[in-house]
Image (cartoon, rainbow, N blue to C red):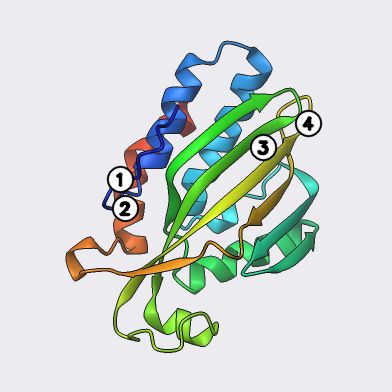
Amino acid sequence: MTSPDIPPRFDVTHWPLRVEEYLRKTENPLHRAMLKNYYRHLLLELSGYWDQIIVPELTIEQPAYRVSDHGTVAVLNGKEAVEEFYRETYEARVNVMGARTMNMCVEDFGVTTEAYWAHVVPGQYLIDQGHVADADPDAHYLMNYNIFQVFAYTTDAKLIGERIYADAASYSYEKLAPEDVVTPEQARAALAPLLERATLD
């Protein structure tokens, strides 16, 4: 699905389009159903539709998440806690993210990925979180790191939960030129055709 080559510029459509390619090559009905769920979920998250992710059509009633970030792990149990996680990500304007390169596999238990990941984040966010004390508060940065993700699904392809483990020693930060910044609004517009396809399929 991917090569080890990392695109020089972040493109918010790169990861979703690679998932589309993987889905087209997948024939097992259960695996296809899980990948369709995964694909729609990621598009909703990147587009900022946080309140449309933890819904009965896509997710069990009480999902369970473990999400690591800079060496700490947040344990989130239940719809309210997981929705709060997505809401806070959207409100902090750090929902623009994706794999710059990724290995993916799907089996009967769910979807597993290993990726070189990137977040587009405001400089002020990095300062507030204590990640980069001397970040330019008026700039945007690409926060890169290695990540391992496991998405578990039921036998009818509903999301049970996520286990997201980031390599705490791998974080790096690239200050973006203004023309390379992808805002949440730009991401939503760029992903709209893909989300429409995912919703209709």
Specify which label sits upstream in the sequence, 2 or 4.
Answer: 2
* Residue at the outermost front position: 169
Viewer-side label of 3, 1: 1
Query: Are the residues tagged 2 and 1 within 8 Å (C-beta)?
Result: yes
Specify which label sits upstream in the sequence, 4 or 1.
Answer: 1
C-alpha separation, residue under disc 2 versus residue under disc 3: 31 Å
Amino acid on which disc 1 is placed: Pro
Judge whether 190 appears above or below 86 on screen: above
Tally the marks. Answer: 4
What mark, if any, has residue 10 been given in the picture? Answer: 2
Viewer-side label of 2, 4: 2
Specify which label sits upstream in the sequence, 2 or 3.
Answer: 2
What mark, if any, has residue 7 been given in the picture? Answer: 1
Specify which label sits upstream in the sequence, 3 or 1.
Answer: 1
C-alpha separation, residue under disc 4 versus residue under disc 3: 12 Å
**Which residue does the image show at 37% across and 36% down from the upper left?**
194
Q: Callout 4: helix, strand or loop?
A: loop
* Most foreground residue, 166 or 164: 166
| Residue beneath disc 4 | 154
Examine the image and state in which quarter residue 173 appears.
bottom left
| Residue beneath disc 3 | 57
Viewer-side label of 4, 3: 4
Amino acid on which disc 4 is placed: Thr
| Position of residue 72 in the picture relative to residue 88 (left or right) | right
Is there any visible trace of residue 139 in the rendered image? yes
Residue 120, position in %: x, y? 39, 64
